[in-house]
Amino acid sequence: MHGPVPRVLVLGGTTEARLLAERLAADDRRVSVTTSLAGRVAAPRLPPGDVRIGGFGGPDGLAAWIREHRVDALVDATHPFAATMSRNAAEAAARAHVPLLALRRPGWAAQDGDRWHFAESLAEAAELLPAQGERVFLTTGRMGLAAFADLDGLWFLVRSVDAPEPPCPARMEVLLDRGPFTLEGERELIRRHRLDLLVTKDSGGAATAPKLAAAREAGIPVVVVRRPPVPDGVPVAGTPDEAVRWLRALYADGSAASG
């Protein structure tokens, strides 16, 4: 390490990233934690510790930032579908010679009664929709709606934190909302809008899981977009507590040094 206080950079934007920052800020070993947010959400919930907002300019920019700020360890706690950022983190960590951990909440698991159809991408999900339903609950976020823009025969209820930008489906209603959501609320949306199909990314976590239970109860199919894999060679923690233990092991043996 560079000194008595380990310096940790958390690539954030998720609940897990915020919880990790809270754990590290309260750590009696004293950890200097900086959380980086992409800035795509208008009013993000800020974690404790230092916060920076905005991109780094690719892996070279991230590696330069790590060196300049003498970061000892990097934690990629971005959204499970932020594949580009995860690749950049892996490249930057290798170039800057700092240890990297991916913090990923576990994906969802199908239960009895679920009617799940898997897709490898949003484009593949869009191809599945016409055969599955007509009134679609689209919960994949405001990014990537272009994949569904040509499905003029379907109606979409699009839920996202911030307003989507075109291209978008021609027949849609936008619902601006942020989780956590309740089972009763999801049941009501399905009933009120007569929804007969749900589209979701396999984001995992409890905050948005009630939509899956509501779809199961209503007997409607769910198109699930599989998450991209973590870059090769990057260790994975499933919870903030696991990430804290990984970091503490680095402090203990002094390997959180960036050479």
Image (cartoon, rainbow, N blue to C red):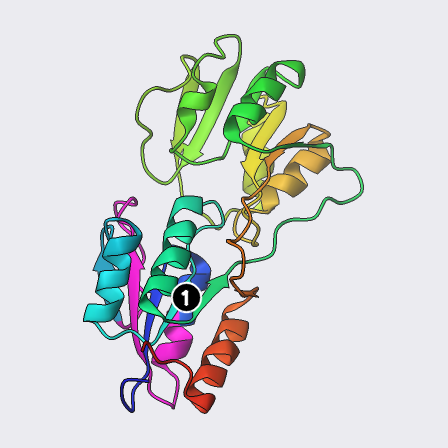
* Residue 5 occupies quadrant: bottom left
**In percent of the image, x 59 and y 47: which residue is there?**
209
Q: Position of residue 21 (x, y in %)?
A: 37, 71
Residue found 40% across the figure and 45% down from its top: 84
Residue at 57% x, 50% y is: 204
Residue 193 lies within the magenta run: no
User: Badge 1: how crowded within 10 Å, few (<14), some, or many (20+)?
Assistant: many
Residue drawn where x is 25% and y is 45% of the image? 42
SS type, badge 1? strand
Residue 52 appears left or right of 101: left
Q: Where 189 sits versus 185, above or below?
A: above
Residue 234 placement (x, y as % from top left): 51, 62
Residue 133: percent from left, percent from top: 63, 17
In this view, the residue farthest toward the right is 112
Q: Position of residue 64 (x, y in %)?
A: 22, 62
Instruction: Please say if 179 is above or below 9.
Output: above
Residue 94 placement, left or right of 134? left
253 vs 45: above or below: below
22 and 118: which is toward the camera: 118
Q: Is residue 46 visible?
A: no
Report the quarter where the N terminus lies: bottom left
Q: Which residues are magenta?
A: 21-49
**Which residue type does callout 1 highlight?**
Val
Q: Main secondary structure of the magenta part?
A: loop
Q: What residue would you read off at disc 1?
A: 75
